[in-house]
C-alpha cells in the first residue's frame, strides 16, 4: 500500500507541473492580452487619447513585453513563495481576491457532494435490489428529470416559485447585513440558513447520475454466478450483498469522486451567477473574458489541484475497497 501511495503522489506532482504549463500557454494563446482588452474597453467608452506610447508603457508595466517562458518562470517562482500575482482587472492581489471565495466554494461543493452521495447511495441500492418495482420506476423518473433539466433552468424555476408563492427572494449565501461582515457565529448560522437552495440545485443532477451508476453496477453484480452460488449455500442475504457485490459495485461509484468536486465548481458558473453566489466560478469567467492571466491561471490551477487531490483520495478509497487496484 505504501508503494502505491508513493506512486500516486509522484504522478500527482508531475500532473500538477504539466497542468501549470498547459494552463499558462492556453491563457496566452488568444490574440492580444489584458492590455489589448483594457484599451479596447477604454476606446469603446469614448476615450480616444490612448496612443501607442501609452500602450507600450502599459505592456512594459504588466510584463507583457517579455517572452512567454520568462513570464511563466517568474509566475512559478512566485507561486512557490505563495505569491499568486496581482489581478489586472481588480487591481488587487489574487490571494486576497480569491481567499474567502475559495473557502465558500469548497464548502458549498463539499456539502453538495456529501448530500449527493447520501441521497444516491441508499436509492441506488434500493433500485438494484428491487428492480422494476414501483419505487424503482419512481426513482428512475426523478433521476431522468434531474439529468435532463439544466441547472440554470432549475434555478429560475425555484426562484420563481419562491417569489411568486412565498414572497421571498433567493440569492446569495448571506443576508444583506452579513455580506461584508467579519466571520462570527451569527454569520456562520446565516450561511447555514442560505446554503440549502444552492446545494439542492447543484446536487440534483449529480445525485441522479450517481443513482444510475450504482444501480446499473450493483444490478449487474447481483446476477453473476458467485452471487447465485452464495445464495445457494444459504449465506445471509444482507451480509453477502454488503460484503461482496456491493464492494465491487462501489468501484465506479468511488472513482467518480475525483472529478465530481471540480465538476461542481466549473458546472456551477451559471447557477452561481444567477443566484449571486460569491464562488470562484463567476470570478474565473470574468477573468477569462478580460484575459486577466494571473487571476485566471491561479483559479484554473486551483481547479486542477482539486481534481488531482480528489482523484488521489478516490484512488486510495478504491485501493482500500478493492485490493486488486494496488497491484
Image: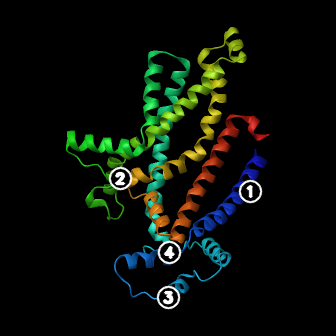
Give neighbour class at mark 1: few <14, some 14-19, many 20+ (Cα, 10 Å): few
Please report whichever mark, 4 or 1, sits nearer to the chain's N-terminal start.
Answer: 1
Query: Eyeballing the image, is 230 above or below 102?
Result: above
Q: Secondary structure at mark 1?
A: helix
Circle on res. 34: 4
| Earlier sequence position, callout 1 versus callout 2 | 1
Q: Please tell me whether residue 187 is drawn above or below residue 238 in the rendered image.
A: below
Label 4 or label 3, whichever lies nearer to me, is 3
Residue 24 in view of the camera: yes
Q: Secondary structure at mark 4?
A: helix
Q: Specify the quadrant of the image occupied by residue 81.
A: bottom right
Q: Earlier in the sequence, mark 1 or mark 3?
A: 1
Please name the residue that numbered disc 1 is placed on. 10
Q: CA distance from mark 1 to mark 3?
A: 47 Å
Task: Give the Cα separation between the discs numbered 4 and 1.
Answer: 35 Å
Image point 36% across, 61% down: which residue? 183
> Under tag 2, what secondary structure?
helix
In the image, which is nearer the foreground, mark 2 or mark 3? 3
The residue carrying mark 3 is: 52
First reached walking from the N terminus: tag 4 or tag 3: 4
Is tag 2's residue or tag 4's residue first in the polypeptide sequence? 4
Amino acid at each position: 500500500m505504501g508503494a502505491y501511495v508513493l506512486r500516486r503522489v509522484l504522478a500527482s506532482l508531475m500532473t500538477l507541473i504539466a497542468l501549470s504549463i498547459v494552463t499558462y500557454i492556453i491563457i496566452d494563446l488568444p490574440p492580444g492580452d489584458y492590455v489589448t482588452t483594457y484599451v479596447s474597453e477604454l476606446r469603446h467608452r469614448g476615450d480616444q487619447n490612448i496612443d501607442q506610447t501609452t500602450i507600450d508603457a502599459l505592456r512594459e508595466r504588466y510584463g507583457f513585453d517579455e517572452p512567454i517562458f520568462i513570464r511563466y518562470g517568474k509566475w512559478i517562482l512566485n507561486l512557490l513563495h505563495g505569491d499568486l500575482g496581482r489581478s489586472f482587472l481588480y487591481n488587487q492581489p489574487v490571494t486576497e481576491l480569491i481567499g474567502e471565495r475559495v473557502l465558500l466554494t469548497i464548502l458549498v461543493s463539499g456539502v453538495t457532494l456529501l448530500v449527493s452521495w447520501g441521497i444516491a447511495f441508499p436509492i441506488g441500492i434500493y433500485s438494484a435490489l428491487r428492480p422494476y418495482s414501483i419505487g424503482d420506476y419512481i426513482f428512475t423518473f426523478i433521476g431522468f428529470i434531474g439529468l435532463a433539466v439544466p441547472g440554470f433552468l432549475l434555478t429560475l424555476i425555484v426562484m420563481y416559485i419562491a417569489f411568486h408563492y412565498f414572497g421571498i427572494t433567493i440569492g446569495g449565501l448571506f443576508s444583506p447585513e452579513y455580506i461584508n461582515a467579519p466571520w462570527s457565529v451569527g454569520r456562520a448560522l446565516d450561511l447555514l440558513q442560505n446554503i440549502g437552495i444552492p446545494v439542492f440545485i447543484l446536487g440534483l443532477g449529480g445525485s441522479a447520475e450517481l443513482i444510475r451508476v450504482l444501480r446499473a453496477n450493483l444490478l449487474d453484480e447481483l446476477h453473476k454466478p458467485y452471487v447465485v452460488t452464495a445464495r445457494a449455500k444459504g449465506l445471509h442475504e444482507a451480509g453477502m450483498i454488503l460484503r461482496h457485490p456491493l464492494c465491487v459495485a462501489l468501484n465506479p461509484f468511488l472513482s467518480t469522486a475525483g472529478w465530481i468536486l471540480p465538476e461542481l465548481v466549473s458546472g456551477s458558473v451559471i447557477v452561481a451567477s444567477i443566484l449571486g453566489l460569491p464562488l470562484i466560478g463567476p470570478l474565473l469567467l470574468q477573468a477569462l473574458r478580460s484575459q486577466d492571466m494571473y487571476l485566471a491561471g491561479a483559479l484554473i490551477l486551483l481547479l486542477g489541484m482539486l481534481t488531482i487531490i480528489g482523484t488521489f483520495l478516490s484512488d486510495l478509497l478504491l485501493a482500500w475497497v478493492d485490493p486488486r487496484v494496488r497491484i
